[in-house]
Amino acid sequence: MNLSQLALGQEAIIERIDDQDVYLKLLDLGCLPGERVRLEFIAPLGDPIAIQVSGSVISLRKQDAKTVQVTPI
Amino acid sequence: MSGRLNIAIAGNPNSGKTTLFNLITGLNQKTGNFPGTTVEKKTGQVIQPSGQELSVTDLPGFYSMYPKGEDENVSVQAILSSIKDKKYDKIIFVADAGNLKRCLLLCTQLADLQLPVIVAMNMQDIALAKGYDLDLELLSRKLAMPVIPINARKRIGLKELLKAITEKQETPPTSYFPSNPEEKSLADAVFKVTSIRNYYANMLLSQHLSLLGNEKASMQMLISGLGFDARKHQAEDSMERYARIEEILKTVHKKTKNTTSKEVSTKIDKILTHRIYGYLIFLLIFFTLFQSIFTLAQYPMSWIETLFAWASNSLGEVLPKGIISDVISNGIVPGLGGVIIFLPQIMILFAFLTVLEDTGYMARVSFIMDRMMRKVGLNGKSVVPIIGGMACAVASILATRTIENKKERLITIMATPFMSCSARLPVYTVLISLIADEKYILGFINLQGLILLCMYLLGIIATLVFSFIMKFVITETGKNYFIMELPVYKWPVWRNIYYSMIHKSKDFVGQAGKVIVAVSVVLWFLGSYGPKETFSEIDKKFEAMSFDSEKEKDTQMASEKLEASYAGIFGKFIEPAIKPLGYDWKIGIALLSSLAAREVFIGTMSTIYGIGDQEDNKSLKEKLLLARNSEGKPVYTVPVAISLMVFYAFALQCISTIAVTKRETGGWKWAIIQFLFMTFVAYFSSLITYQILS
């Protein structure tokens, strides 16, 4: 399952991030494997999405979120 | 205390860096660019009450020593190149207590570079609200660097921080050692060039070869020979750091209670990013922005206009007659006026932008608009510059700096000038009044207003279409993700808004001002001088003639001289080219003079058509309606007026925009493409418009 498939408010643990550019950017923002994420809200047109992770809210496009593999809690 | 201390302020974006910088330096700030870039560099010189002199640099916000965008790259390189000669006596690292884990990533990187870092722990109130209490003393011991609690917004902790700056501090030990033989040989090789005794510094420098000077090429060879993967190294380094940070945080984080008020920001977001209210509020905010740019700025703008007209007149009277006095009173002063008149709009625009940025709303605008903008090759962050383009493209192009994606930023810069800016407004107003009466459709829709709205829509459509075209033209590639932090909502800091208004104004007058004044002077020369023989003939002719009044003689003479001037010659020269658009040589001169700035059109038209007019009290509208061509037919027919409006809607007649595009894209290439393309579109659209309508 990937991050873009989470339901609103659903929480999950990040397993790995496949796209290396996305991975490195997310690392800088404190969003890394093992971290707990919650799908906070979705932009009105369904994309991008915003996640809550290690104390901050990060927005990313669905295409970026698809590369983030998660396990729902 | 002796000697000046060099201080750099570093930290993540939205950590309160700039607020602290403004607090320390006050208005003694200078803005410039980091060498070789367009990234704004802010420095400030201050003398402490103790007599200690400080030189403070505000580094653009960055998340780690592995830069992802232009702004981040500048900060990283500034730090890396400061290591060898110990350029910074102290680095103030502004940490956001509410996002400590992420902040410590960069903080431990700086520590491993063995730089003299002081941690300014900001926003503890937000951390407390999130349910976190920090043991700062323990944190300071763990990081081996001073940690000073501050609250930049409330001016708390500044004294302690400034005291810590002047104190001696131990260099923190480095915790970084190469984890494999490749890393070690790479670091050793860089060490031979830099002689910096720090593995981490050399590792990072191997990723910024431009800083290694002559050794660049040989290092490149070495790196590819070693098969060193910088990205893999970065990922491993960051993961390892986070593991360590987690350990530190376990001991210093005293989690007091479960997150209670975390959710104020989330609640606001539920409304501001709502699929209906979200857009309504967005529209409302930007509608207000517009109204203020038009209505509020109108008063200071008319004062400035009056002031410069008066200055130009009285200078003309006071100064002894001659070329120099003419240049000053008719060239430079009006030219300067043409620059300064935009200041009120720029100040209002930037005051609004700073508020929207500081509160965190701007990130939400980008969030809700990204999907729509992406369709035409733009990005959520393009919305603000494009909307701002309705006020002023110059200010808006400066505002594109927040867009990290190079391609999307470039498209935004290229497309923004198609939006109908405020300088087009006076031109539209005059031309619309020629073709439409003040009447109402259905009893309440003002016809003139409706046409004006159409012109603005035309601008919006052109912007989007052009962006869409550029999407395929621009090959510039870069990372194509769109990931950003949505910062916690905060109240704006009034001091920051005030400073931003002052600095953007200085920036504008300094950069664009030079060009505008230069062009105005050139245009004035072209309009006032012509081939000697023709001019002296005109002089002689008017000597011989008699007039009812001196004034009449002057206006008649001015008219003939204009026609004979270089500008007039140019107008006649391009007449064949603009004839199919419905324009005569006089409009040609107006087009030429509007190259400096569109609103010059009105002034030029007033001069040209002021001619042969006995009574001076006719309005420009009446003069234009009375204008006749050589065949005795009215010049300003409906097709001509509409064709002219279309031309003004599309043509890039704004030297300031050209100058700012050149500056922001780092060269003439895109500025020239933009100018040529817009002129091309303007010409052919007007041609088609005129040919169809007439």
Image (tube, coloured by chain):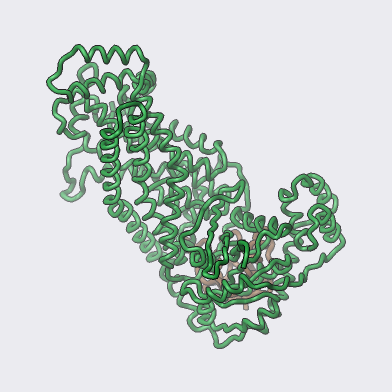
Chain colours: A brown, B green
Q: Which corner quadrant holds the C terminus of chain B? A: top left
**In this view, B436 is above or below B99:** above
**In this view, B321 is above or below B514:** above
Residue B301 vs residue B461, the one in the foreground: B301
Q: In the rendering, at what x and y percent does residue B472 appear?
A: 56, 41
**In this view, B191 is above or below B333:** below
In this rendering, position of residue B206 left or right of residue A29: right
Residue B504 vs residue B240, the one in the foreground: B504
Which residue reaches farthest bottom? B256
In this rendering, position of residue B52 left or right of residue B335: right
In this rendering, position of residue B185 left or right of residue B131: right
Q: Which corner quadrant holds the N terminus of chain B? A: bottom right
Tell me what residue is drawn at x 72 percent, y 73 percent.
Answer: B170
Whether residue B689 is visible: no
Q: In the rendering, at what x and y percent does residue B120 appear?
A: 58, 73
Q: In the rendering, at what x and y percent does residue B132 appear?
A: 57, 83
Whether residue B46 is visible: yes
In this rendering, position of residue B480 left or right of residue B415: right
Residue B319 vs residue B652, the one in the foreground: B319
Q: In the rendering, at what x and y percent does residue B503 appear?
A: 45, 54
Tell me what residue is drawn at x 65 percent, y 61 percent.
Answer: B88
Q: Quadrant of residue B4?
A: bottom right
Q: How many marks?
A: 0
Q: Quadrant of residue B635?
A: top left
Tell me what residue is drawn at x 24 percent, y 17 percent.
Answer: B630
